[in-house]
Amino acid sequence: MAALMLQGTGSDVGKSVLVAALCRALTNRGLAVRPFKPQNMSNNAAVTIDGGEIGRAQALQAMACRVEPHSDMNPVLLKPQADRTSQLIVHGRVRGTLGSGNFREARGALMTEVLESYERLRRQCDIVIVEGAGSPAEINLRAGDIANMGFARAADVPVILIGDIDRGGVIASIVGTRAVIDPQDAAMIRGFLINKFRGDPALFEDGYREIERQSGWPGLGVIPWLSAAARLPSEDAVILERPADPREGRRIIACPILPRIANFDDLDPLKLEPGVEVVMVPPGRPIPAEAAMIILPGSKATIADMAALRAEGWDIDIKAHHRRGGMIVGLCGGYQMLGRRIADPLGIEGAPGEIEGLGLLDVETTLFPAKTLRHVRGKALGAAVEGYEMHIGETGGDAAARPFARLDDGRGDGAINREGNVMGSYLHGLFASADLRRALLARVGVAGGARDYAADVDTALDEIAAEFSAHADLGALLRMAEAGA
């Protein structure tokens, strides 16, 4: 059984996308492949076939392997819910909360469980493609590490280092990594890849050879900017820091960027609709008055995000939009915010307390420790939908008698106001349904739903795999994976 680990010189160098590309490239060669990330930190998650949750990137990588996502693919998931605390998910289930004070000690103790998941995956396939987190050059975090070299050495998995040329300084980032890491860690690295290259690769030939000379590692390819990656689901919140200007002639769907925004990839299918522009509104800016629809996203800390929404003055923008008859959709935590009140009597998200919601739906929410995690199917707005629930709390009230969706198991999901322009749902992933997008966008005068989102993502995976295969030494990568560390 073979294995290979892709680590990066920093965050957002494209590790997740290149792992997905390599997974699909090897799968297309007829190999049984599984993705693996020992430790992830993300509030974008997906529900797995075994009823757990993992990082959204690993769910996408499972799709690249043409297998169902499983909790073993990301055994440790940290979901930030305050500046210094994160919810700890182990093997897909909530295990508690980690603070900055006990983070290092606690994560080191998880190595045994990480290796258990890895071994189970190994027995299922021909090759495991492992994704690191952050960078091995963060030597201040090396003690107790389970995400990068700590795992690579414990599991004896060879490493390929990825450098991002688009951000600049790629020579220094790779050579500098070699200079600062432990010699035994450096010995795990078998070569490097240059990612996100634009222009003529011949212009970088001297730099490429200089990296080889100074690092002692062979270069394994220069990967161009993968434009098809823009059609893949988003995981990293870094993408939220790059707002685009709305294009003329499109109806605006506005989404405020809450401090603990979660599962913002729910909006990705809407971004592919030619008639609309999804505008992610950063703190300090008003929600555009010309927006045709406002979507309140999921949240990892609903009460704190409700307070932040109010502090930004976005509640005023939302209520003004409502008075004008505009459409408002709340997803998960956003649905909870649309109600009259959110109560946390047990202190699930922080100190016990409650907060007044926007009052646009006649419902109230009480948070409880048990987390709902399940795949669901049903009908909403007359369209077939499927998605997954991933939330804590129960929501009820008069508006719930007009559910947003009627699920196949007979339950109602969410609520719609009497006028039909405010609606909330606990379902993640529902916008992937072309029929649902068509029905929703028709309410703001836009023709939509012409594209099959799942098919589009699958095609994008094939495209990035083809580009990766054309520019990386795939044969050398396979030989390194088979030879081991």
Image: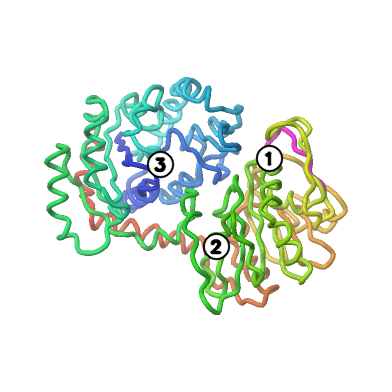
The outermost residue toward the right is: 398
Picture layout, residue 66 above or below residue 97: below
**Location of residue 251 (image quadrant):** bottom right
**Badge 3 amino acid:** Pro
The N terminus sits in image quarter: top left
Q: Is residue 367 magenta?
A: yes
Mark sitting on residue 35 = 3
Q: Is residue 421 left or right of residue 57?
A: right
Q: Is residue 277 left or right of residue 476?
A: right
Residue closer to the observer: 384 or 5: 5
Question: Residue 32: x and y, percent?
Answer: 36, 43
**Location of residue 126 (image quadrant):** top left
Question: Residue 227: x and y, percent?
Answer: 37, 63
Residue on which disc 1 sits: 372
- Return the disc, 1 or 3, that comes first in the chain's sequence: 3
Specify few, some or many for label 2: CA neighbours under 10 Å numbering under 14, 14-19, or 20 or more. Answer: many
Question: Residue 207: x and y, percent?
Answer: 16, 50
Q: Main secondary structure of the magenta part?
A: strand
At a point 81% along the width and 54% down the height, the residue shown is 359
Q: CA distance from mark 2 to mark 1?
A: 24 Å
Specify few, some or many for label 1: CA neighbours under 10 Å numbering under 14, 14-19, or 20 or more. Answer: some
Residue on which disc 2 sits: 269
Specify few, some or many for label 3: CA neighbours under 10 Å numbering under 14, 14-19, or 20 or more. Answer: many
Q: Is residue 52 visible?
A: no
Q: Which residues are magenta?
A: 364-372
Foreground tag (3 vs 2):
2
Q: Secondary structure at mark 3?
A: strand
Mark sitting on residue 456 = none
Q: Secondary structure at mark 2?
A: helix
Residue closer to the observer: 479 or 317: 317
- Return the disc, 2 or 1, that comes first in the chain's sequence: 2
**Badge 2 amino acid:** Pro
